[in-house]
Each structure stands twice: as structure tokens, then as C-alpha cells.
Amino acid sequence: MTTNTIEDAVRRVVEYMHVNLGQNLTIDDMARTAMFSKFHFTRIFREVTGTSPGRFLSALRIQEAKRLLVHTALSVADISSQVGYSSVGTFSSRFKACVGLSPSAYRDFGGVQPGFPSPASRITSVAHNLSLRGRIHSAPGERPERVFVGLFPGRMRQGRPARWTTLESPGAFELRDVPVGTWHILAHSYSVGHQPHRLDSEPLLLGHSGPLVVHPGALLRPVDI
């Protein structure tokens, strides 16, 4: 089986998720769409995307909910149902856990986070003076105007980053006082007029490195993204 065949199968499933966000999708449904057994589908989906089908679907639902909150007048209950949640309470709890704000607060702020934590706040266990350095590269022909680099607990860009920085263009970066734990370094581009903490639109370019295990006294090697 070729890499292209596997990626095409995963792409079909992602498109199927987009079209059926409001439905009760199961792993069996996705596996049939991919034309693989359930076990094999789950494995290749994780290999291609870095996360499970369920978590990927949840992220798509939250992303669509953010768009609807900002760009429509639908009630939170209607949005909850439209993105596949049968309980408004479950939707609101999941949304706040992923985004850092309740659906109503996200709408009130117009889809803009009121602020990220400062580099040394909100983390109780910190490997003091331990910095992560690296470099962001762009492919030939790509010219991102700005780059956001953040430290997240998962491979998907959800919630608030534990550490973050912005760059004027691809190049060297440093994240200081990296917290103890297992982290993913996620980078995305944004235009001059786009605020890096606005999460209701898809970034043009993405990069990832990790997982990175951090413990006191760890030696953090430079990363290339």
C-alpha cells in the first residue's frame, strides 16, 4: 500500500467528517469511508494526523463552533446541535476546555482571546532557566509575514499555550522557562493584519515538532520546524 493511497483514505475521512459534523459519527462509519478495517484505519489515521479519529473530529467540531459563534446569530444551543452535541452542557464544557473561554464569552470577545499567559505564569512546575531554542523554516516559495510559536500539551492547537513567542519572519526562536511535562511545539503563520491569538480562521502555514519530554535538568536540543 502506497503512502498516497493511505493519505487519500485519510483525506476522504476528513472530508466525510466536515460534511457530517452534526451526525453521530462512529469509528465504524469512518473506517467504511476509508475502506479499511476499523483497527487498521485507526492506526493509519493516527500515523498521518498525529492524533486519533475521535480527537480530530472533536477539534473540527470546536473549530466549526467558533466560526458559527463569530459569524452567525445562532444560539449556543443551536450551534451545539449543529456541530454534533446532544447536550449543551457537554458542548460548553468541551469548548471551554479546548478554547479557554465559554462559548458565550468567545462570542462576546469576537473570537479574539483576551490575552495569553505571560511566559512565567499559570504553570506551577517549571524547569527554571531551561530554554527551548529552535528555528522555523519555510519551504521555497512560501513567505509567511509573521510566525506564532507555542508550546501545547497536544498536537492540536487547542487551549492556551504554556509558552509562546512571535517572529517577524521564519528564523530562530526561544521559549524560556519551559514547564515540566510532555509538550508539542506548534507554529503557524499569520498576516500582518491578523492577530495571532484569534482562533476563528485557519492559518495558512503550519509546523510541528514533538512530543518533547521535559524534566528538571533535561537537555533540550534545538528543534527545526
Image: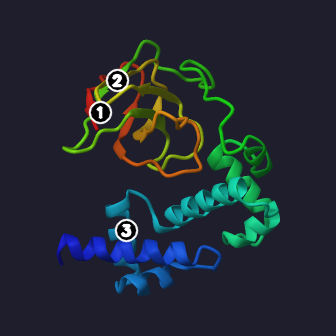
**Are the two marked residues, 1 and 2, in contact with CB atoms closer than 8 angstroms?**
yes
Above or below 37: residue 53:
above
115 with respect to 77 (left or right): left
Q: What residue is pinned by disc 1?
A: 136
Q: Measure the alpha-carbon separation of dots 2 and 3.
A: 31 Å
Give the residue at the far top of this rendering: 129
Sequence order check: which comes first, mark 2 or mark 3?
A: 3
Residue 95 drawn at (x, y percent): 68, 53
The part of the image, by quadrant, that contains residue 73 is bottom right
Query: Which residue is drawn at the image coordinates 43% and 59% (left, top)?
Result: 51
Badge 1 element: loop
Q: What residue is pinned by disc 3?
A: 45
Q: Residues within 10 Å of mark 3 (few under 14, many from 20)?
A: many
Sequence order check: which comes first, mark 1 or mark 2?
A: 1
Badge 2 element: strand
Report the quarter where the C terminus lies: top left
The part of the image, by quadrant, that contains residue 145 is top left
102 with respect to 34 (left or right): right
